[in-house]
Structures are given as C-alpha cells and as structure tokens.
C-alpha cells in the first residue's frame, strides 16, 4: 500500500473535494479501498485512484456492462462493479506510481486497454486481475 500511496493521496484529495459537493466516504476493507459514493462529477460509474474509488452512485455492489460488451465486441453478461474496481486497486498495489503512465500507454479508458479487460475478467470470474498476458478479446 505504501507503493500506491502517492496515487491514494491524490484520490483522497479528490474525495475530500467531492465531499463539499455531497460525496460520502466509506471504507471497504475487502476491496482495500476507501470509496467516495455520490461523487458529483463524471459520466457515471467509478474510477479508482490508488486505494480510493470515486463512485457516482450510492452502492458499488451493482452489475455493470463489460468494456467489450459496451464496445459491441460481443454479448457478455454483466459483471460486478465492485470487483472490477477491486482489480484496479490490485493493479495499483503492484505498479504504484507507474500505474497511470502504463495504463495510459495501454490506451486509456476503453475496451482496447488490457487493464480494463483484466478488470472485467476478474469481475466475471474472480481471477486474472493482472493484465499480462492480455485477456483474449471477445469475438465480434
């Protein structure tokens, strides 16, 4: 967690700013994260920054579409948003301050990013949160 601390501090700062606009923090020990629910900005869903999850809703334990499904790469069942974000927490714990540059170099937010596909795989199966080797793409 110390290795991810620089990112976590940024997440906590953003969470504290969000609290002025109605965000509410909740520690989720099982996810190794502090979640700020009702995050007031963004298109919806959640984003992980270190051991902090900024979530626009009121409950992280909901189903969500996989990135591949949303991109039209095939029909996939919905997965757990909490598990998807937990996978990103694990990825931050390994890569620490290198996470964001490596994540962005892999394509940023979207179905082509191996970090997102690995998080979807973990959310679907409970295994495979590490992005290498890249998870297979769903067939079109």
Image: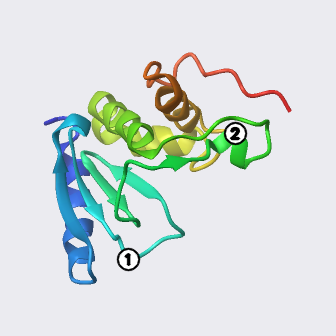
- The numbered dot on residue 53 is none
Crowd band around label 1 with a 10 angstrom C-alpha radius: few (<14), some (14–19), many (20+): many
Q: How is the image coloured?
A: rainbow
Give the alpha-carbon distance from disc 2 to disc 1, as whole Å.
26 Å
Residue at mark 1: 40
Q: How many marks?
A: 2
Q: Secondary structure at mark 2?
A: helix
Quadrant assignment for the N terminus:
top left
Residue visible at 61% across and 46% down?
65
Residue 138: x %, y % from top left: 75, 28
Q: Is residue 114 left or right of residue 86?
A: right
Q: Secondary structure at mark 1?
A: loop
Residue visible at 48% across and 32% down?
123
Residue at mark 2: 68
Pick the front one: 65 or 134? 65
Q: Residue furthest top?
A: 133
Residue 115: x %, y % from top left: 52, 34
Residue 118: x %, y % from top left: 53, 29
């Amino acid at each position: 967690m110390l290795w991810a601390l620089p990112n976590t501090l940024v997440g906590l700062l953003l969470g504290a700013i969000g609290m002025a606009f109605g965000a509410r923090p909740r520690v989720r020990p099982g996810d190794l994260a502090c979640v700020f629910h009702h995050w007031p900005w963004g298109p919806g869903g959640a984003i992980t920054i270190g051991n902090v999850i900024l979530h626009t809703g009121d409950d992280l334990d909901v189903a969500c579409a996989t990135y591949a499904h949303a991109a039209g790469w095939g029909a996939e069942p919905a997965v757990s948003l909490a598990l998807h974000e937990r996978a990103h927490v694990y990825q931050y714990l390994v890569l620490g301050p290198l996470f964001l540059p490596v994540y962005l170099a892999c394509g940023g937010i979207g179905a082509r990013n191996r970090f997102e596909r690995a998080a979807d795989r973990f959310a679907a199966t409970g295994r495979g949160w590490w992005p290498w080797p890249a998870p297979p793409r769903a067939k079109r």
